[in-house]
């Protein structure tokens, strides 16, 4: 099976590079992936898969039937790009000014398509069915939710995914047991004081002064009240309030993002934030409102499926091509929403150039991909998929 997969991948690699370059030069923003979706659907149909378009708004789903085993394996790839002005000089540079595939989702889509091509060309059906999920709007953390609302996880027994990673060298696969990414929630705080003359603070309740204490108290409290082994990052990224230099502000709005790794920590965050803000506001008579919106949970990789991916990547690419990831990232990934419906695992696809001193990070205007990563990604994903029904996962 492995040698057959490798030989198919070798044959289709030039086509995959072509597909990736097409996607790269025609990026589309989250929720607007119309042309990308049509292109993906075209490639999938030409492989003989049953294709459904407009799933989860601009998503595409395709199915490959199996040979009787009812366990359904899902493979997820995201398709959207970012509002970034590309600063690379490539023959296949973005043709859409201000939009760039700077998170490697063009590579994810290509690897997903490559895996579909390989599994469709095996000649014999796999033991069970495979469902390919080409998801829109990952960058805005909406797409997975849209897809799930349209029923894509019905009947799914396991889900596999990948994310490109520039600090991992191309042709290497990063494997993480346990938490890969953090939970990300949105926070909005409104502090309500009382306006007054800038020269008469004793007759007013200064919302700007109180808001600045809220920010510092939240930051300091993390280090004194949260378990340092269960990280919390709270970033206030926006602050606004006040009307004039000589008028004490009555209202200040703060908004930010809260990242955490442990479900228990995450569960307690709204109450913890409320207690701290109450403690700051009460002595001065200020009022407050908190809007804590749950975003996406942490990606918690399933042990057996992670083991399957690691073993298949090692067999296919060589043991030295496996990099165990020792620390989770506090970035967020809406792949975690699929994991609320079935166990799954996400691996990191190395895309870094080994002969360069600098590989620019994800979301950078000079982010670039070593395209030899594509074949490694397809071999890993196709082989791990083919072995799913024989594994203990
Ligand atoms: Ni991404």
Image: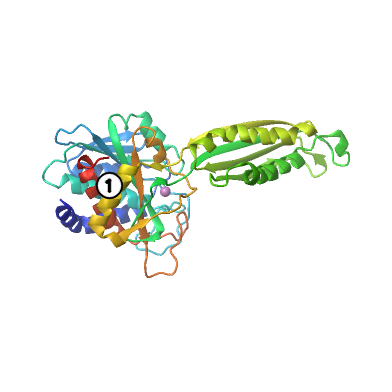
The crowd level at tag 1 (other Cα within 10 Å; few <14, some 14-19, many 20+) is many
Residue 355 or 49: which is nearer the viewer? 355
Residue 187 or 183: which is nearer the viewer? 183
Q: Is residue 334 above or below residue 348?
A: above
Q: Is residue 23 above or below residue 127?
A: below
Note whether residue 172 is visible.
Answer: no
Label 1 secondary element = helix
Quadrant where the image shows the C terminus: top left
Q: In this view, does 138 lie above or below 12?
A: above
Residue 182 at x, y percent in the picture: 48, 44
Residue 285 lies left or right of residue 362; in this view the side is right
Residue 32 at x, y percent in the picture: 40, 41
Residue 95 lies left or right of residue 224; in this view the side is left
Display colour scheme: rainbow
Occupied quadrant, residue 367: bottom left
Q: Is residue 225 above or below residue 25?
A: above
Q: Mark 1 = which residue?
A: 308
Residue 89 at x, y percent in the picture: 40, 65
């Amino acid at each position: 099976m492995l040698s057959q997969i490798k030989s198919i991948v070798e044959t289709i690699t030039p086509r995959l590079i072509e597909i990736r370059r097409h996607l790269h030069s025609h990026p589309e923003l989250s929720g607007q992936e119309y042309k990308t979706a049509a292109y993906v659907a075209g490639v999938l149909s030409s492989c003989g898969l049953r294709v459904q378009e407009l799933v989860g708004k601009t998503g595409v789903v395709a199915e490959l039937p199996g040979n009787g085993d009812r366990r359904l394996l899902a493979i997820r790839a995201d398709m959207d790009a970012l509002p970034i002005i590309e600063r690379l000089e490539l023959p296949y540079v973005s043709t859409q000014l201000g939009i760039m595939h700077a998170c490697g989702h063009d590579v994810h889509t290509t690897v997903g398509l490559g895996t579909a091509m390989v599994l469709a060309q095996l000649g014999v059906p796999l033991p069970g069915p495979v469902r390919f999920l080409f998801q829109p709007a990952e960058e805005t953390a909406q797409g997975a939710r849209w897809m799930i609302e349209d029923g894509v996880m019905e009947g799914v027994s396991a889900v596999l995914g990948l994310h490109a990673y520039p600090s991992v060298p191309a042709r290497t696969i990063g494997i993480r047991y346990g938490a890969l990414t953090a939970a990300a929630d949105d926070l909005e705080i409104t502090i309500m004081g009382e306006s007054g003359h800038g020269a008469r603070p004793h007759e007013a309740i200064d919302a700007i002064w109180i808001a600045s204490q809220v920010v510092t108290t939240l930051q300091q409290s993390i280090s004194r009240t949260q378990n340092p082994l269960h990280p919390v990052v709270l970033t206030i990224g926006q602050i606004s309030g006040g009307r004039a230099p000589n008028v004490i502000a009555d209202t200040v709005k703060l908004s930010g993002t809260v990242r955490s790794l442990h479900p228990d920590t995450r569960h307690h965050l709204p109450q913890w934030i409320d207690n701290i803000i109450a403690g700051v506001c009460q002595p001065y008579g200020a009022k407050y409102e908190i809007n804590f919106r749950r975003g996406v949970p942490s990606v918690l990789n399933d042990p057996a499926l992670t083991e399957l991916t690691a073993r298949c990547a090692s067999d296919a690419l060589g043991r030295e091509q496996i990099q165990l990831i020792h620390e989770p990232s506090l970035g967020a990934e809406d792949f975690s929403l699929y994991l609320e419906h079935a166990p799954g695992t996400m691996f990191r696809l190395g895309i870094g150039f080994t002969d360069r001193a600098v590989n620019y990070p994800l979301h950078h205007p000079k982010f670039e991909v070593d395209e030899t990563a594509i074949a490694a990604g397809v071999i890993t994903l196709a082989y791990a998929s083919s072995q799913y029904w024989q594994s203990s996962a």
